[in-house]
Amino acid sequence: MQRYTDVICSFCGTLCDDIEVVVEDNKIVDVKHACRIGTAKFLASNDYEHRLLKPMVRKNGKLVEVSLDEAIEEAARILKDATKPLLYGWSSTSCEAHSVGVELAEELGGVIDNTTTVCHGPSVLAIHDAGYISCTLGEVKNRADLIIYWGANPMHGHPRHLSRYSIFPRGYFRERGQQDRELIVIDVRKTDTAKIANKFIKVNYGEDYELISALRKVVNGGELREESVAGVPREEIIALAEKMKNAQFGVLFFGMGLTQSYGRHRNIDNAINLVRDLNAHTKFVIMAMRGHYNVTGFNEVLSWQAGFPYAVDFGRGYAWYNPGETTANDVLQRGECDAALIIASDPVSHFPRKSIEHLARIPFIAIDIHPTPTTQLADVVIPSAIAGIEVEGTAYRMDAVPLRLRKVKEPPEGVLSDVEILRRILARVRGEEALTAKAEVAK
Amino acid sequence: MEITLITGRTVAQGEAMEKGKIGEGFTKACAVIELDPEDMSKLGAYEGDEVRVKTDSGEVVVVAKKSSSAPHPGVAFIPMGPWANVIVGGDTESTGMPPFKGTKAEITLAKGERVLSAAELVAQIYTKDKE
């Protein structure tokens, strides 16, 4: 029996680093401190019945088991034969895998995009325009006395965000923890996070922009003449603006409620400017509630290697970045890509039908740990080991702090890491001899 | 009845997803629509009834659930997953982001109709017609 402490949970962008895991006979038998989703992820790694274990290739319309070498060969052939392949996913694997993926995309002249495109893509666009006044989660824990979640429901999406960083923990300047802080939730529904807040403000769907503008007006000394804005009474808006101005250290965490609803990047642009305005009165920061555990890491790696954070098209022979054109859903809906590689993601479940109708039509490779609706439609399926449980690697927390993922058990027999799978595909695309399992041992 | 459809993560969806999308748990967690209680009574639906949700993109049968985040009349929530996304609109308005929150939808009763599993739904809607 082996006990591991300070294990990092590879589920959400909170990247909890205090997990305790007990492993016996290469099975995880106990998980401590993790949330419901994190615990499920650790324990599900044991469940080989629900894991992908054998590589598969579609033959005569059916997926049949093949050797790993054959699957890699077929994957490389599909990608090489394509004029413009789309390489999508990435947010649930390590930065080391991202790095090889970017190299592969450049080699192929393809489009590379990650799940940023369907979560905080609009936030990235707003940051290009307005900047980003942010901090680390450690600063939130030690300093923040006013926490606002706007269009975010961490009780469901980031279950330990409140207990580790924002409301409940005791911090250097917040010795009494929750008693030294105030929580405000702004949302279209009274979510489970809103239920534990000191104050819940219900905004009409699609009118967040108007509410942010009203707050900016009051913060900047203007007089609000409207009885109510976005369904929120004038007095409440004035009180909220005053509270924000009088905080010692305020944080505005925002989520998909702002990025995926009407207004998209314009909502975030306005929110960043609200925070900028507040800094004339006090210290205020803003932070995107990044979803997947390493969605931030992909933005970092692509920025180092290609100069842009997501949605890069290498089709011209150099990195071309134009979200709205080079983003995965737009590339799919225009029917522009003629093959795809999907890794550590399930777009068939999570992209709109209009995008997937095209994906289903083109040959594509899926690299994943579980069977998913995406592997169901794929032409080549390659099982992979779980980063953060079965392989090490680097991941970036939502505040862009890099943490080292740990390995606590061996992957199923014959199952490689994403990094190794991608290296082999890249080698075959370049026409180099792929490393066989035997050669690997000899090395 | 017309509603504004929003989609997103729930803790049950996340847990079921990590346990595997092939199992029944994933269907139970995601093939549901959380409705405002007043909207439910207007519709004549009780908790556990099947309802059909139709948009310009398509339609899907899911199970009605009384929202614990009410009141939010006119707004309904389906957890992210294939059931939500076969009816979510596709237009990114050149931002890269589809309208995962804010697709207009029409809800009608569909008592007794079968709710498809993820695999059945995908097989029914998407075809591999490249051969």
Image (cartoon, grey):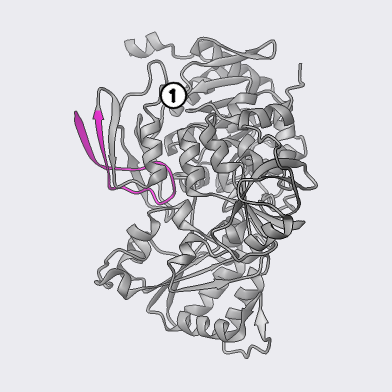
- Give how far across and how far down residue B100 sits, in percent: 66, 51
Chain where mark 1 sits: A
Residue with the most extreme right position: B56
User: Is A354 placed above or below B1 here?
Assistant: above
Quarter of the image where one finds residue B75:
bottom right
User: Residue beneath label 1, please?
Assistant: A420
A190 horizontally vs A111: left or right: left
Question: At which x and y percent is residue A418?
Answer: 46, 28
Quadrant in the rendering for residue A331: top right
The local secondary structure at tag 1 comes to helix
Q: Is residue A438 above or below residue A355?
A: above
Q: Is residue A327 visible?
A: no
Does A177 sit above or below residue B42? below
* Residue A8 within the magenta-colored segment of the rendering: yes
Q: Is residue A291 left or right of residue A109?
A: left
Quick check: can you spot residue A203? Answer: yes
The amino acid marked with disc number 1 is Glu
| Quadrant including the N terminus of chain A | top left
Q: Please state, as top left, top right, bottom left or bottom right, where the C terminus of chain A lies in the image.
A: top left
The one nearer the camera, A307 or A291, is A291
Q: Quadrant of residue A314?
A: top right
Rendered residue at 54%/29% (across/down): B22
Image coordinates for residue A200, horizontal then vertical, percent: 51, 72
Viewer-side residue, B7 vs A261 = B7
Judge whether residue A125 is colored magenta.
no
Mark 1 crowdedness (10 Å alpha carbons): few <14, some 14-19, many ≥20: some
The image shows residue A198 at horizontal and vertical percentages of 43, 74
Q: Which residue is at the front of the view, A387 or B54?
A: B54
Above or below for A442 versus B108 = above
Q: Which residues are magenta?
A: A1-23
